[in-house]
Image (cartoon, rainbow, N blue to C red):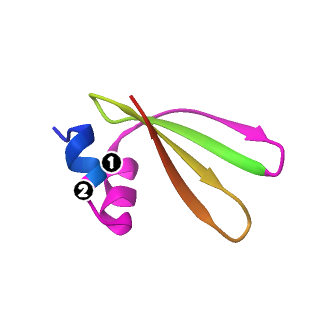
Amino acid sequence: MITLYDFHAMPLTEKAAAVWKGIFIWDRPEEDLFVQLYNLSTFYAEVFTTRNDLLLAVYM
């Protein structure tokens, strides 16, 4: 099981891989972004995407 502290220490590519292994909860549009929520057991991660970029934001 990954902890939030482990997750913060990872490079972006490893963070992305960890999120995709999480449990998908839901998605929603927000202005010109698309937001997906994942459960990673001890915390949640939101993935924000636009047409050109990917940004990971993590919430406990």
x, y percent for residue 43 = 34, 30
Q: Which residues are magenta?
A: 9-32
Mark with earlier residue (1, 2): 2
Splitting the image into 4 quarters, where does residue 27 fall? top right
Q: Quadrant of the N terminus?
A: top left
x, y percent for residue 31 = 83, 44
**Can you identify the residue that label 2 sits on?**
9
Splitting the image into 4 quarters, where does residue 59 fall? top left
Asked if residue 31 lies left or right of residue 53, the reply is: right
Q: Residue at x 26, y 60 (%)?
A: 10
Asked if residue 28 lies left or right of residue 40, the reply is: right
Asked if residue 8 lies left or right of residue 37, the reply is: left
Closest to the observer: 47 or 5? 5
x, y percent for residue 46 = 52, 41
Mark 2 secondary-structure assignment? helix
Asked if residue 41 lies left or right of residue 37, the reply is: left
Find the residue positioned furthest to the right: 31
Query: Within the magenta stretch, is there residue 39?
Result: no
**Can you identify the residue that label 1 sits on?**
21
Of marks 1 and 2, the one in the foreground: 2
Neighbour tally class for label 1: few under 14, some 14-19, many 20 plus, Cα within 10 Å: few
